[in-house]
Amino acid sequence: MRIIDKSVNEEKKFEDLGLDDIFKYDDRIFMKVSHDYDSPNAYDLTKGRLTNISNDTSVKYVPSELILHERGWDCRTKQIDL
């Protein structure tokens, strides 16, 4: 997986993020996967594992879009919106 962050990040508390929101913390990129603070609630995309972030932790929100494509896809191919 290739992750590129070209955004200007807004600082927020972890508890204020929605499910599936992407954020940066400690120079790594995460996705919020749960509102439960007693079990893993974030997926560390950099290290590829679940982790727990406390609700009062300040993080940098990353506006993002997940684009899935099949193997062999060429990023130079013209994009067609349906």
Image: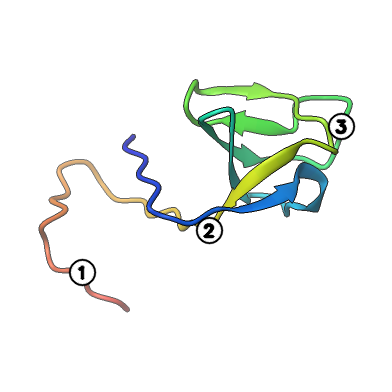
Looking at the picture, how far across and down is residue 59, in whole percent? Answer: 67, 41
Q: How many labels does the image show?
A: 3
Give above or below for 58 relative to 79: above
Query: In the image, what residue type sits under mark 3?
Result: Tyr
Residue 5's disc number: none
- Pick the quarter of the image with the N terminus: top left
Query: In the image, what residue type sits under mark 1?
Result: Gln
Residue displayed at 32% across by 79% down: 82
Depth check: give the residue in front, 19 or 53.
53
Query: In the image, what residue type sits under mark 2?
Result: Pro
Element under disc 1:
loop
Q: Which of marks 2 and 3 is nearer the N terminus?
A: 3
- Residue where numbered disc 1 is placed: 79
Give above or below for 72 relative to 21: above
For the residues marked 3 and 1, what is the alpha-carbon distance in whole angstroms?
40 Å
- Residue where numbered disc 3 is placed: 37
Task: Please indicate whether residue 3 sits to the left or right of residue 17 in the image.
Answer: left
For the residues marked 2 and 1, what is the alpha-carbon distance in whole angstroms?
21 Å
Depth check: give the residue in front, 10 or 17.
10
Give above or below for 46 relative to 20: above
Depth check: give the residue in front, 10 or 36.
10
- Residue where numbered disc 2 is placed: 63
Looking at the picture, how far across and down is residue 39, in whole percent? Answer: 82, 24
Q: Which of marks 3 and 1 is nearer the N terminus?
A: 3
Looking at the picture, how far across and down is residue 51, in whole percent? Answer: 68, 23
Residue displayed at 55% across by 53% down: 9
